[in-house]
Amino acid sequence: MSIIIDCHGHYTTAPKQLEEWRNRQVAGIKDPSQMPKLSELKIADDDIRESIVNNQLRLMKERGNDMTLFSPRASFMAHHIGDFEVSSTWAAICNELCHRVAQLFPEHFVPVAMLPQSPGVDPRTCIPEMEKCIRDYGAVGINLNPDPSGGHWKEPPLTDKWWYPIYEKMVEHDVPAMIHVSTSCNACFHTTGAHYINADTTAFMQLIQGDLFKDFPTLRFIVPHGGGAVPYHWGRYRGLAQEMKKPLLDTHVMNNVFFDTCVYHQPGIDLLNTVIPVKNVLFASEMIGAVRGIDPTTGNYYDDTKRYIDASTILTPEDKHAIFEANTRRVFPRLDTLLKKRGK
Amino acid sequence: MSIIIDCHGHYTTAPKQLEEWRNRQVAGIKDPSQMPKLSELKIADDDIRESIVNNQLRLMKERGNDMTLFSPRASFMAHHIGDFEVSSTWAAICNELCHRVAQLFPEHFVPVAMLPQSPGVDPRTCIPEMEKCIRDYGAVGINLNPDPSGGHWKEPPLTDKWWYPIYEKMVEHDVPAMIHVSTSCNACFHTTGAHYINADTTAFMQLIQGDLFKDFPTLRFIVPHGGGAVPYHWGRYRGLAQEMKKPLLDTHVMNNVFFDTCVYHQPGIDLLNTVIPVKNVLFASEMIGAVRGIDPTTGNYYDDTKRYIDASTILTPEDKHAIFEANTRRVFPRLDTLLKKRGK
């Protein structure tokens, strides 16, 4: 039996005190007299328990998902708001909450850290928060936002040396990054229907254009939401790499890039598993996320992605074990260490 | 036997005089003394013949494609360069060239017009060029760029009244628009590997968010490149529409939106035809475009998309006829009229 590990979950159901405090922080950017103190945010353990037991944990049990790699709500990272100081305070609060979730439910949640990114600010400013989360909270990975502007795309591509300080720390601590944008503040891009998916596609293409993994052979990225448009256009990406005289994608990027299974229908999951090697696919649902409803064509939740993997006739039982557990333990070695300590 | 109609071809092989003239025009934006006269662009019919016979027409014959709806090279539209005057002159030149191709090879090419869009400029300025192309050149459709900034996305979404003057003329003349961006001048977005695909996804999501087809029930859009990421994430889009309390996509957008088959591998085409109704799929290859090489896994050109349709076991012969011919005649009624006049 595999441990079913969902590598992509966010704390979308945090107690409402969190949002209220954030609203005051945002108001405080314009009017410093309104800026709340950290000590004014009070969330009791029982509030956290309730927000989890009735939501993520309930659905995990219903669906048979054992464990979720759990990070702050992606759309609330909103790195475009305020300056580094604002992002830094906000990231610290959100990461601590995920840490508390993991302490309260250690069998079910393991933290992944958001970074205190801010548009145009040197990413090395994120390192103290990142290292604190790894060291003190047991974070096994990070979420890296390639566009802290929120839909204006003003940072350099991910292959630029601008980002290298983060990559050096990722390699040092052996943690992967999920490439994950936040809320779009560009009216053209719907957050979860366009910006998220576009960012996935964009990031993968940047990695094809560059040679990042020559500099960082052990760096690992998860491209979420099934890799954006990439598997559907796998021929295009193979062909573009060929036009650019890059090596085959298998060696150029696919030792370092992994796609999650946040694709909310069976044919999409089947395509993913037809074109992308099993070793590059990690189980995930991002549940209680963008798409919370029930698919009228199946009667099941759109984001109950375990059903699609279970129902796959393309994957062998060994493949499914790789996707549900083994790949994620390989890509997140700190998770593997944790599980081994627990005799798993 | 169907007439095999490729609804998405660009004049990517235009004689080099065109690019040379454009380079001088671009230089002339900064230094008006260098601005070339229209009369300085000299392209003989033989130059055009050669550029077509050895390229598009040769491959069309090899592949069994009878006819291409042919528009100016998408990446060269470059609406972000200069002002409306620059775009206007450039669009007129490019559209006239496609018209000449269609005059020289009337059995094989039918023109589709580019518009002289310019960032921030009222789209109604495009109407004279659009109507000239329909009236004088026999253009059966237009290409509409949702982001004339080239990757900065500063215009309003396609559902905004900003765009309505174009839509009114599309309805009046019964021409559809392919939603097609041009070159990216944002370093984050590779033109054909990210910007094109992102624009497709973005446009479709904008159409879900809005209610444009209530105002224009007969308006028709082709979302190229297989609809960007949309078919792969069909569950996500169905679910997002549901969260937004929109009608089912079948009625909300799928009477008005069509996807082409520019998906460069068999599994992608198979997914498209698994989730998208046959009536919404139009054959296209965008050949001699972004991906010109041969797929080492098949020995065939990536962009020889007819092979994927031919090989499909999902589609019936009737379905294939719809995709190769009937749907395109329905979506482009002026093409249908033209073909009927020819007894086809």
Image: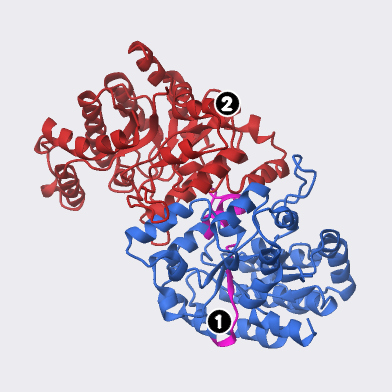
Chain colours: A blue, B red
The residue lying toward the viewer, choosing from A155 and B265, is B265
The chain containing the residue under callout 2 comes to B
Vertical order, A8 against B227 (above or below): below
Q: Indicate the secondary structure of the residue bearing disc 2.
A: helix
Q: Disc 1 versus disc 2: distance between alpha carbons?
A: 51 Å
- Asked whether the viewer can see residue B330, the reply is yes
In this orientation, which residue lies closer to the viewer: B298 or A195? B298
Task: Report the amino acid beneath label 1.
Answer: Met
Residue A243 drawn above or below residue B240: below
Q: Chain of mark 1?
A: A
Who's the residue at 18% across and 49% down the image? B23
Q: Which residues are magenta?
A: A172-200
Residue B286 x %, y %: 37, 41
Is residue A16 left or right of A274 when viewed as pictured?
right
Q: Magenta segment: does it hold A151? A: no
Q: Quadrant of the N terminus of chain A?
A: bottom right
Nearer the observer: mark 1 or 2; the answer is 1
- Residue A322 screen position, x and y as percent: 67, 69
In the rendered structure, does residue A173 fall within the stretch colored magenta?
yes
Residue B215's disc number: 2
Q: How many marks?
A: 2
* Same subunit: marks 1 and 2: no
Q: For the point 77% across and 73% down, which residue is it?
A: A109
Residue type highlighted by circle 2: Asp
* A326 lies left or right of B192: right
Q: Position of residue A98 (x, y in %)?
A: 75, 74
Mark drawn on residue A11 = none
Please identify the quarter of the rendering in which residue A155 is found: bottom left
Which residue is labeled 1 in the image? A170
Q: Where is the C terminus of chain A found, in terms of image quarters?
A: bottom right
